[in-house]
Each structure stands twice: as C-alpha cells, then as structure tokens.
Image: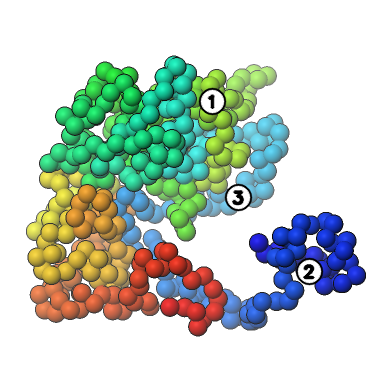
Amino acid sequence: MVVRCEPLVKEYRDTGSQTNLAKKFPQKVLDGIRKSPDDFPSISEPEFVRHYYRLSRLNYSLDDGLYPLGSCTMKYNPIINETIAQMEQFGNLHPALPVKYTQGALKIVYETQSMIAEILDLPGISLQPAAGAHGELAGVFMIHKYFESRGENRTKILIPDSAHGTNPASAAMGGYITEKIPSDEKGLTDLEALANAVDENTAALMITNPNTLGIFDTQIVKIKEILDKKGALLYVDGANLNAIMGIVSFGKMGVDLTQLNLHKTFSTPHGGGGPGQGALACSERMRDFLPSPTVVKKTSGGGDFYDYETPAQSIGPVKGWYGQFGIILRAWAYLKRNGGCIREISERAVINANYLRKKLDNRLALASSEPSMHEVVYSQKTLEAKGVTTKNFAKALLDRGFYAPTIYFPLHVPGAMMIEPTETESKKEMDVFLEAIMDIFDMLEKDPGKITSSPNDTFVREIDETLAARKPVLTWHEEAAP
C-alpha cells in the first residue's frame, strides 16, 4: 500500500509530529508512506505531450480503419453520442441527489430500458450490471433465487461448447456445476446429447445464440421444449445481438434470461477493456428476481415521475447506484437516432460478414457450412497446408496496417479465426482489407518466410504473449521495456 499525500508526507517528515501521526493512522499506512520521491521523472510539458502523442500513433483504433475482431463487435462510436455524454448537465450530476433533481437522467435510463425490452421482446429489464459477464453472473443469481423460491436445490447448468467462455465462468462463480454439451457436425447444439443431460437437477442451459461460430441455432424452440420437460430455464447469451435486432423475438424463443452488451450492440466505447455496460432482460416469471433498484415511470400531479423500485424477490444490488450512466447515455443516444432502422443495422452487419465470406471462399476453410450471421469463422486447415499458422496470418495483417481478427477462439475450432466487420464498414473499406489478405496469400507463394516471421514492420516484434499476460512490465523506465 502506497500513500501519496503531500500534507501527510510533510507531517511525517516532521519528527516532532510522528507520535501524533501514529495515533491517526494504522502502522501499515505509515509503512507505505514514501520518505522521499522514488526516482520520479521530471520532464517538461512539451516532452510529456510528445511522448503520449507518439504512443497514440503506435496504437490502432476504429479511427484508423476496419477493426475485424470477431465476437467483440468493434463498431464505430458516433461522435454525437460522445458529445451528448460530455454535456456538463450530465457530467456534473451526482447520483446521490434526491430523485426529484435527477428526473432527466432517470427518464433516460427508463427509456433505454424500454427500448431494449422492445427490441428483445421481453418484459423485464435491468441496466445495473457493469458489463455483459457481470449481467451473466446476476442472471445466475436470479436462477438460484428462482429455484430457491420454489423449494428446489438444483446444482448444475449446461453449457454448449459453442458458448462464450464467460458462460461457464459465470455459472461456476454462481455456485453451479457446469456440464458441456457438444455441437453436431453443423456447429449446432447436439439435441440428443442435450436431452440425455437434462434432468431434475438441471437449473438452466446457457446458450450463446448466435453462437461463437457466427451461426444462429435454428433448433432453439426444440431446445426450449427439452428444458421445459424437466422444468429447467433457458438462458440465452445475447452478446451477439447485433446480428438479430428487430428480426428475432427472444420472447417467442422462450428465453427466461438474457444479457447483452451495450458496448457491443449499441456502439459505446470499449477502450482499455471497458468501460463496459450490460443489460439483463428476463421473462415474466423472472421479473421479481431482477437486481434492485429498477427505474419505473409513475404518474404524479398529472405528469410523469421517474423513481426507483425494488422487485419483490430481488437478488439485491449488483453495482453501486444504477449502472454506468455515461455508457447508458451513449446507448440511449444511439437508439434514439437509429431506432427506426434497428433491423436494417443487423441486416447490414450480416451482409457485410457474408460479403467477406464469399470473397474468401477459396482462400480459407470455413468452420461451419451453416449460413454466417454477423461474423464468419475459419479453421487453420488451409493455412496449415501452406506451412503457416493462424497466428502467422494474424501477425502478417499487422504489417499491412490492420488490426488482427480474433484468433484461437472458439476453442473447439482448430486454429480458429473470427472476422466481424459490423454494419459500420463500407464495401470500399472491406475491399482494402481483402486486398491485404490476398497479398498475404501471394507472399506465401513467393516468400513464405516473410509471413512466418511476421510482424516485420511493427514497433514491437516477437512478443511472448504468455509472459506479457502473466508478468506485465508497467513502468516508465525505458531500460525496463522488453
């Protein structure tokens, strides 16, 4: 623990007041106080600005070009959303103010809830979760409380192998045993395996749909019927909602719970792994178990009044206050601006993915022959035949000015590569991306060593990804950089 507080340090340096200071703070705090600056750099403002400007130019963002990360849905964040979110009226609004002084903010939360509920065709909604996986965990808590209210103690949740990795993690963190359900040869849920696995001890199936192969599981109604026979719940991970907005009804699929990511579907920022924001929606029978509080609209004095409300059997709060308001605000702006063309957004996302799929038909090996939705997934088969790996291919894209697609996920696809252009990319930009891919294949014929040694032109080369994740070096010392 390090305390950096100049008045405190000054007082500590004054030997005459150390005794009094010891009465104010525990010893572990005093031990963490720096007696002198720890070789802290001293630089001018121009040097400081230039340093971070140079770093920013080494990064890649959607401002540079297509960001093809599959599953992450890295779509463009409209500037108007950012402008609204930075308005002083919102930035200076404290959540602890009485509700009568925060009616505008609560109205925005309520309207966002209502618009998402309409898109999903589900009656219950909470925007409190801080991210998609956080919404999953809250959903698992709701599942537990639902069965507890019925006097049942179910202990397992089923997870298809085509689900997002957060699904089994959330189920396990919620206290459940997880059991994997295999996919069939098409990449869909194996119904026979599912029927054999579901019993009176099954609390739910957590299925990602569209799944991580980028395909929609058309058997979802049959899956629901299998679960209903044993009284189990259907949880559909909605992280890939961008492919089916305005097209698929979660209500008609029989979904009991779903979470989605505002930072994926509704164009809010991803920066630095966040800030995320999740939405948790549910069927009528699960509404009473939603996190608290929810925002409701009431009539008061002849007008609308927005207030907090606690569901009857709520699992309680899962985050301070009510969600990440700055992100909810951006999603609200996106929905207000694009609400009339939600279906068109999904159709465009699907068309873009299939355009890339068609153009790469004879170059890369598809992971599934089923129709692609918002993303297209390939295996390493074609690349292996040419003596390279998915990683080599991804690194070669960096040399050609593009961020690499998601690689080695989903795990059940050998050398997987997921490409998701989203609806915000033009045909022109996708053609530039395709040219880069074609150039890689041409280079494989001329000089394969150029590809296997990639990246050759980036600022940093040959990073040990495992070591970088396990032992990151976070320091300003230039000599400490690998």
Find disc 1 in the rendering and name its residue: 314
Amino acid under label 2? Val
- Of badges 3 and 1, nearer the viewer stands 1
- For marks 1 and 2, the one nearer the N-term is 2
- For marks 2 and 3, the one nearer the N-term is 2
Residue at the (53%, 21%) spot, across then down: 313
Tell me the element at label 2: helix
Instruction: Look at the picture and state if 303 lies above or below 401.
Output: above
> How many numbered marks appear?
3
Answer whether residue 356 is visible to the viewer in this image. Answer: no
Find disc 3 in the rendering and name its residue: 87
Calculate the distance from the C-alpha at mark 3 to the C-alpha at mark 1: 33 Å
The 10 Å Cα crowd at callout 3, few under 14, some 14 to 19, many 20 or more, is few
Amino acid under label 1? Ser
Query: Considering the image in quadrants, where does the C terminus appear?
Result: bottom left
- Residue 126 falls left or right of residue 66: right
Instruction: Look at the picture and state if 346 lies above or below 441.
Output: above
- Residue 118 or residue 87, whichever sits in front: 118
Tell me the element at label 3: loop
Amino acid under label 3? Met
Find disc 2 in the rendering and name its residue: 9
Q: Which dot marks residue 51?
A: none
The 10 Å Cα crowd at callout 2, few under 14, some 14 to 19, many 20 or more, is some
